[in-house]
Amino acid sequence: MRFEYTIEAGNFSKAGDASSSFKKILKQLNVDPHIIKRIVVSLYEGEVNIVAHAKGGKVICDVDTSRVTIQLIDVGPGIPDIAKAMQAGYSTASAKVREMGFGAGMGLQNIKNNADELIIKSEVGVGTQLTIIVNLNKA
Amino acid sequence: MKLREVAAILNAEVVCGHTKLERDVQAVFASDLMSDVLTIDSEKLLLLTGLVNIQTIRTSEMSDIKNIVLVRNKKASPEMIALAEENRIVIMQCSYSMYKASGLLFQNGINPVY
Ligand SMILES: Nc1ncnc2c1ncn2[C@@H]1O[C@H](COP(=O)(O)OP(=O)(O)O)[C@@H](O)[C@H]1O
Ligand SMILES: [Mg+2]
């Protein structure tokens, strides 16, 4: 099953709408609540990043019997140094983002800690694509 | 500890979730940083925060946090209350500082998360 959401740049009142919708679906599918939490925390941090740092984008969530695969695809500006962006505490967030309770440079770490797999691809001037995979069967 | 007792200790006003005050609270986490809150995985948690905007409630929704106390006399907006009600989240408001509210709850025996 595939679910798609559009993410608007800079719209903090809507940041989290996609995560909220997808969480409701996972509940309906009777996914274990601890696994749901890992999925939606990752998705929410990724969604906030698109609102905060990118010029908008979309989220594609694929659910099959064994895993959830989430692709967060934005339209730029891209991340010049992914290793640096991954470091806890590194942030280019604006004052507005910090007012919203984010911008401490922990988002990508949070995603990494909750995902079974995280792949980040980015090209400056083109965009960033995060792929987050969470397994549904408890190991 | 029951939410009802938390409200009494903090002299807090219940903004929404009046029917849910018999809920049990086992631990408290105090933070204004939502990325920090998103790292917490505790049951029956109470969030103490001075960050007051829609992301406070969104973060709680994602983290399965059902109980929030706003400190420093901050007020929940109608939009926050609507989203909280939809998610069966209790919001209380208190005029104490984060330090005082934390200290009182700690003194009354509620555990920290770490
Ligand atoms: N989708 C994105 N597009 C452009 N830059 C991004 C994106 N996601 C993250 N970044 C960059 O990586 C940094 C670290 O991200 P993150 O760990 O989520 O922390 P924060 O969002 O709090 O700054 C950001 O400050 C930003 O510079
Ligand atoms: Mg972030």
Image: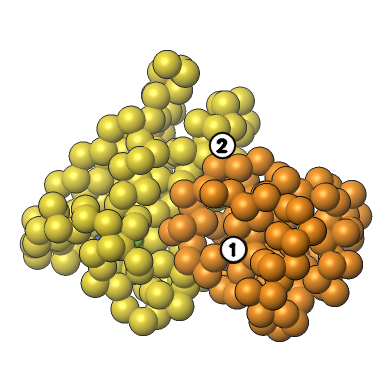
| The CB of the residue at mark 2 lies under 8 Å from ligand 1 | no
Quarter of the picture containing the N terminus of chain A is top left
Taking the spot 23% from the left edge, 64% from the top edge, the residue there is: A90
The chain holding disc 2 is: A
Q: Label 2, label 1: how many angstroms apart (C-alpha)? A: 30 Å
Question: Which color has been applied to chain A in this rendered view?
Answer: yellow
Secondary element type, mark 2: helix
Describe residue B18's horizontal placement relative to residue A62 as left or right: right
Secondary element type, mark 1: strand
Q: Is residue B73 above or below residue A37?
A: below
Crowding around mark 1 (Cα neighbors within 10 Å: few <14, some 14 to 19, many 20+) is many
Indicate the quadrant where residue A97 lies: bottom left
Name the spot of residue B60 as percent of width and height, x first: 60, 55
Q: Is residue A88 above or below residue A43?
A: below
The chain holding disc 1 is: B
Residue B27, visible in the rendered structure: yes
Q: How many marks?
A: 2
Question: Which color has been applied to chain B in this rendered view?
Answer: orange
Q: Is residue B72 above or below residue A56?
A: below
Residue A16, visible in the rendered structure: no
In the rendering, which numbered label is found on residue B80?
A: none
Describe residue A104's horizontal placement relative to residue A18 as left or right: left
Q: Name the quadrant where ligand 2 sits.
A: bottom left
Taking the spot 49% from the left edge, 52% from the top edge, the residue there is: B38
Q: Disc 1 designates what residue? A: B30
Please, what is the three-letter code of the amino acid marked with disc 1? Ala
Q: Name the residue nearer the viewer: A30 or B2.
A: B2
Name the spot of residue A37 as percent of width and height, x first: 52, 39
Quarter of the picture containing the C terminus of chain A is top left
